[in-house]
Amino acid sequence: MNTAASTTVAAAAPAPWTPPQLTMSQKVLAFATMCVGMFIALLDIQIVSASLKDIGGGISAGADETVWVQTSYLIAEIIVIPMSGWLSRVVSTRWLFAGSAAGFTIASMLCGVAWNIESMIAFRALQGFIGGSMIPMVFTSAFYFFAGKQRVIAAATVGALASLAPTLGPTVGGWITDNFNWHWLFFINLVPGIFVAVVVPILVKIDRPNLSLIRDADYFGIVLMSLFLGCLEYTLEEGPRLGWFGDHVILTTAWVAGLAGIGFVWRSMVYEHPIVDLRALKDRNFALGCFFSFVTGIGIFATIYLTPLFLGRVRGFSALEIGLAVFSTGVFQIMSIPFYSYLANRVDLRWLMMVGLAMFALSMWNFAPITHDWGAQQLLLPQALRGMGQQFAVAPTVTLTLGGLAPERLKLASGLFNLMRNLGGAIGIAACATIINDRTNMHFLRLAEHLNSGNEAMAQMLSGAGGNLLAWGLDAGSAQAGALKQLWSLTIREAQTQTFSDVFLCVMACFVVATAMVPLMRKVAPPKAPSADAH
């Protein structure tokens, strides 16, 4: 009787679901399509950075308001990235990715037709929140689709896109704005977004929805995480501009971020089914990998912020001129992908990562002698080193960090890994902005100490400038005031240039520390047969 009952129960039990086998060409197409989705989501982080003035003019918004065009996207994206692992388990990678691509496309169209600053901010937040899920899913899908040498190439591709897309953002945005108008910064997403939304459901069938996870979800943890990340991102983005804790709103968001962060960590460690798997940090490689992801985030996003800022403030370049000047970084990164892929199958990835981090540090060292007349030619060497360093630093970090995790933990942990890169970028940019504000004043005062009546060079400069202005028909008083204004402009230009040198050296210090920590990583062999849930 018991045997018959057991047989009946066994017969009634559903057979485990096996994902359909794909040919290599189908895997490559599926993976490439997902990479397109990730690329446009990452590109949109920085694509508006060089065109905020144009956007503000188009929707009649001031400079203080238009910064929210970028800030709202970053806040929404940084909240959803760590949630993507849980969301993909609930609705499946296939439908979450397709839904994210479709929603991102619709939100991009809405951004392009925004009629005022309020609608633009709302649509940009929607764009970042919906599209952010695509980023970590590509990282984990690479471990599902490919194995062995193919996985190394896939990781190199993902790593390249993760650092290349934000790098190209200002270039692409500047070119679009100069040749078309700011609306096309968003309309450019429509064709690739529709393509991704259509192709992914056809090919990406690597897991099934598990709606039962909704019942045991840590909703309190989601609230704590959203408060923590949202308030932290706002504090870091707006802090330098508003004077940090001298502003009551910044002080409040900082307190909320701190308390919610402590609560989120506690909740994630004690709850049985956390949204983000912080327990994965017990694995040495994963913890170190998150640290390296954080540092590379500082380097990638801080230099994307610093170089255009220098070219705009000191050189007076237009958006397109800035884009062309920084374009060499992406060129050298793309050129280094085949070289990295060749070495990655023959050399310990830890050594390659050390070389990449060291090259990034060397790049910052080569930025340090910067002068007020630097342009594309002078930036070529440091940006070439930076582009190659990005490729050799990011790609092995992906494999060494995620490749050693158990398949069932990979989804939840990959969101944390990607979050660390974005947090590094946010903290790096905030720190750079603060250093620029403080050190510029210091360098200006130091230079001004030498601008006194005993300075013959200054006297000659004022005399020559005043004479030129007198020749233009100005009276003596106006000519003297104009000459002093030119002296002030020259002094602030040199103070800013010295400050940018200081900031690049600070970024270099971060990479020197990271390079020294690489030997702590263990060599890992990627899992040969991950489960369907491992992607």
Image: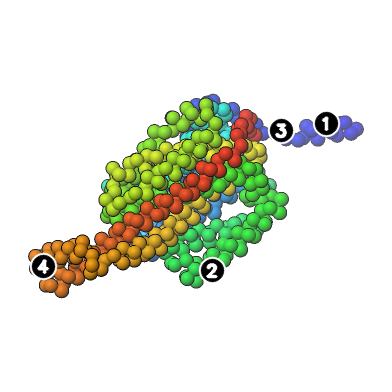
Answer few, some or many: residues within 10 Å of disc 3's Cα (few below 14, many 20 plus, some between 14 and 19). Answer: few
Taking the spot 55% from the left edge, 40% from the top edge, the residue there is 518
Q: What amino acid is at disc 4? A: Leu
| Number of numbered markers | 4
Q: What amino acid is at disc 3? A: Ala
- Quarter holding the C terminus is top right
Label 4 residue SS: helix
Mark closer to the chain start, 2 or 3: 3
Colour approach in the figure = rainbow
Q: x%, y% of residue 253?
A: 53, 65
Tag in front: 2 or 3? 2
Q: What amino acid is at disc 2? A: Thr
> Residue tagged by mark 1?
7
Taking the spot 83% from the left edge, 31% from the top edge, the residue there is 7
> Residue tagged by mark 4?
470
Answer few, some or many: residues within 10 Å of disc 1's Cα (few below 14, many 20 plus, some between 14 and 19). Answer: few
Mark closer to the chain start, 1 or 4: 1
**Residue at the outermost right position:** 1
> Residue tagged by mark 3?
15
> Residue tagged by mark 2?
252
Mark closer to the chain start, 4 or 3: 3
Taking the spot 67% from the left edge, 56% from the top edge, the residue there is 267
Is 217 situated above or below 477? above
Label 2 and label 3: CA atoms lie apart by 53 Å
Label 2 and label 4: CA atoms lie apart by 54 Å
Taking the spot 42% from the left edge, 42% from the top edge, the residue there is 362
Q: Residue 527 carries which label?
A: none
Q: x%, y% of residue 162?
A: 47, 42
Answer few, some or many: residues within 10 Å of disc 2's Cα (few below 14, many 20 plus, some between 14 and 19). Answer: some
Label 2 residue SS: helix
Mark closer to the chain start, 3 or 1: 1
